[in-house]
Image (cartoon, rainbow, N blue to C red):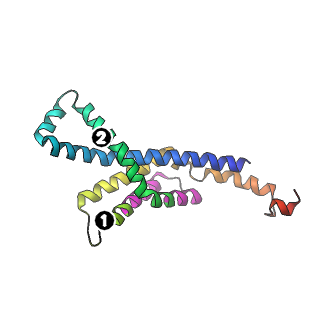
Amino acid sequence: MSLLFSILGRLFIVCFGLLAAFLAAAMIMSYGISTGFLAGFIGSENLEAIDETEWGYGFMLLVTVGIGLITSVQLAALAILPVILAVAITEMMRWNGMVTHLVLGGVSALFVVFTQLPQATVPSEGTLIVTLAMGFVGGFFYWLIAGRGAGSWQDNLPAFREQNPQGKGREDTGE
């Protein structure tokens, strides 16, 4: 029973870590979107004037968070397959290092970009830099919340094996 509770607890932590990672990665993307959108909408000289005011940073933060909340849902929908695969690999292999999670976050982000582009289209250098930054930030936030304990649920497996050393099911043991 403790194995079941440790797996359920780990799933809860992993889900919370993924939510935080997607939100953090979306904030990186939304900052670029919000500055580019506002510069095109109100003009770059007016954007500089907003930055110089005392409420300018608060306004940019509000716009970035608003766009980031919407973007995180779309980002999660696009990246769920490679991210779940990366999480499953790190959990099974007990890879809990920060560099591992950063690399897997970057690889997942690159996978999303290259699968969403039309055929024979090469992304620009700026797109690749922002994409890798999003993946690295997402991987870092996942590592902070859930990645450091990757595979911790497997600590209860020896106790489970000791209870049933032959590997027989309940119907075979007469219980």
Q: Quick check: 54 above or below 111?
A: above
- 145 falls in the magenta region: no
Residue 62 against residue 161 in the figure, above or below:
above
Say what amino acid the circle numbered 1 marks. Leu
Query: What predominant SS class does the magenta segment belong to?
Result: helix
173 and 66: which is toward the camera: 66
The amino acid type found where label 2 is placed reads: Thr
Picture residue at 54% right of the left edge, 61% below the top: 89
Instruction: Give the residues drawn in magenta, as a range.
Output: 86-110
Q: Is residue 25 visible?
A: no
Residue 80: percent from left, percent from top: 46, 57
Residue bearing mark 2: 64
Q: Residue at x 59, y 59 (%)?
A: 92
Which residue is outermost to the left?
A: 45
SS at mark 2 in the image: helix
| Residue 86 in sight from this viewpoint | yes
Contact flag, marks 1 and 2 (Cβ < 8 Å): no
